[in-house]
Image (cartoon, grey):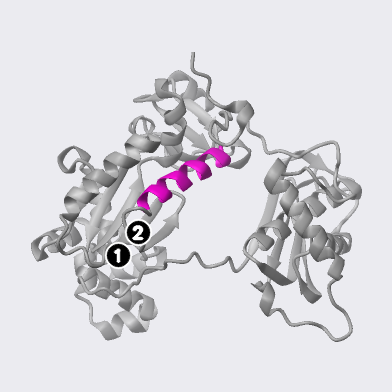
């Protein structure tokens, strides 16, 4: 039996854990630089706030309707997610952390257990130990567990947050209820093609010939179809696969025109990418640098350019990546442009222990010890304690976060005060 545990309105729930006065109040969470709405409480949804709503357009509506607004607080959300996943891991060793607020669990050899009772105990324990409400969907396959979870969440008053597709009758009824665009793994293009054929729900999809599904939707589509038919075909991924590409991109608060300012930003972005690589024990073979002008600035010259630099050897050294990233920036930089956004993307990631060494040129072996020391310092004392010389040593560039809550669970200076 597969179980999908999904945290309800996760970002909003995290804010409410440490600010209980927000319970049953409408609130929204904004994206990086307070751009648009990326999470809403049920109360905000009921007031008609759409996902992706630009914050500046809805500013007046937020104020008139008493909607609380928060900037994304990723240290808090990441820590709360870790706490939830640690609790779920106590129920079964077969756990796949699917996203920051979702996890699949597989119960093998639990034939003598009442899984529904276990699900209620799991839900109660997560709420009691973390304050986060969750919905639980149970089914013989992962795809059906996804649908069961949606039913548990949609009809929470009747299901008490838990629903099990444990009979053929329930499977058919659930597939009839699920619109084809809401099926896990059915993207926009596949949805359009299927709807053009008159297939509007998941049940219709499962009745298509296997040959047609495999031809038009590949073997992944065929596995999804089998999963929805109740035949386990999508297996649990117990290990989180390393990222195949890493990027750090930012929009600036104002605009930048000087090469030196952009060099500092690009160096910081490449250093951030290098740190992410080292965490997953990867190295890269190439990097891309891009810069973009401000399209909204009057009189500004529209400009976008990028540059890909193959590296002479695989590396995860911040020093080496910063050097080549700045070389790329100098190739595409133009004077007189008001730059609003820039970024660094690293490509060709491979496990560090499997990288191919060069006969004539290789990474400086001293960099390895330096990077290990820097990572250790940042882990113990916090980020940005040690920087490269071409980074701004006195100023830490931050996103626009005008509505940021405290990092209650990860920063000692911001811990909750009980009076």
Provide the residue span drawn in magenta. Answer: 73-88
Which residue matches tag 2? 104
Q: Residues within 10 Å of mark 1 (few under 14, many from 20)?
A: many
The answer to whether the residue labelled 2 contacts the one labelled 1, judged by CB atoms less than 8 Å apart, is: yes
**Is residue 208 placed above or below 266 in the rendered structure?**
below
Which residue matches tag 1? 142
**Residue at the location (46% across, 27% down)?**
18
Quick check: is 84 in the magenta stretch?
A: yes
Residue 85 place in picture, x, y as percent:
42, 50
Q: Do we see residue 302 in this rendering?
A: no
Q: Main secondary structure of the magenta part?
A: helix
For mark 2, give the secondary structure: strand
Q: Residue furthest left?
A: 169
Q: How crowded is mark 2: few (under 14 residues within 10 Å), some or many (20 or more)?
A: many
**Is residue 253 placed above or below 230 in the rendered structure?**
above
Along the line of sight, the residue nearer the viewer: 267 or 92 = 92
Residue 257 place in picture, x, y as percent:
86, 45
* Among the two numbered marks 2 and 1 on one chain, the one whose residue lies closer to the N terminus: 2
Task: Please identify the quarter of the rendering in which residue 72 is found.
Answer: top right
Marking on residue 117? none
In this view, the mark in front (2 or 1): 2
For mark 1, give the secondary structure: helix
């Amino acid at each position: 039996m597969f179980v999908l545990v999904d945290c309800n309105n996760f970002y909003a729930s995290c804010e409410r854990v440490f600010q209980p006065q927000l319970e049953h109040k409408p609130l929204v969470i904004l994206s990086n630089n307070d751009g648009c709405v990326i999470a809403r409480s049920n109360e905000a949804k009921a007031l008609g706030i759409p996902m992706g709503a630009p914050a500046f357009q809805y500013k007046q509506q937020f104020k008139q309707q008493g909607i609380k607004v928060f900037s994304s607080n990723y240290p808090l959300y990441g820590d709360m997610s870790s706490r939830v996943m640690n609790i779920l891991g106590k129920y079964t060793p077969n756990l796949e952390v699917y996203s920051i607020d979702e996890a699949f669990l597989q119960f093998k050899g639990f034939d003598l257990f009442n899984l529904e009772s276990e699900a209620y105990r799991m839900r109660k324990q997560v709420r009691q130990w973390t304050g986060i409400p969750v919905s639980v969907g149970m089914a013989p396959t992962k795809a059906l567990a996804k649908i069961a979870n949606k039913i548990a969440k949609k009809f929470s008053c009747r299901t008490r947050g838990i629903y099990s597709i444990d009979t053929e009758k329930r499977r058919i009824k659930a597939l009839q209820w699920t619109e084809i665009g809401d099926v896990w793994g059915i993207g926009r293009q596949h949805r359009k093609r299927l709807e053009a054929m008159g297939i509007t729900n998941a049940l219709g999809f499962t009745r298509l010939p296997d040959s047609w599904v495999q031809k038009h939707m590949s073997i992944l589509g065929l596995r999804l179809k089998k999963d929805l038919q109740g035949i386990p075909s999508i297996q649990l991924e117990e290990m989180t696969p390393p990222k195949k590409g890493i990027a750090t991109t930012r929009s600036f608060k104002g605009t930048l025109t000087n090469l030196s300012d952009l060099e500092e930003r690009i160096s910081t972005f490449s250093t951030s990418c290098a740190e992410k690589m080292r965490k997953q024990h990867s190295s890269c073979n190439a990097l891309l640098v891009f810069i973009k002008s401000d399209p909204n600035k009057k009189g500004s010259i529209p400009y976008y350019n990028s540059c890909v630099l193959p590296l002479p050897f695989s590396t995860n050294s911040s020093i080496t990546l910063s050097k080549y990233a700045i070389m790329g920036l100098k190739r595409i930089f133009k004077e007189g442009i008001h730059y609003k956004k820039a970024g660094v993307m690293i490509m060709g990631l491979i496990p560090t222990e499997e990288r191919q060494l060069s006969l004539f040129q290789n990474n400086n072996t001293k960099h390895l010890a330096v990077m290990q020391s820097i990572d250790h310092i940042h882990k113990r004392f916090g980020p940005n304690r040690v920087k490269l010389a071409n980074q701004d040593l006195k100023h830490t560039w931050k996103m626009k976060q005008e509505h940021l809550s405290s990092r209650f669970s990860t920063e000692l200076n911001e811990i909750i005060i009980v009076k």
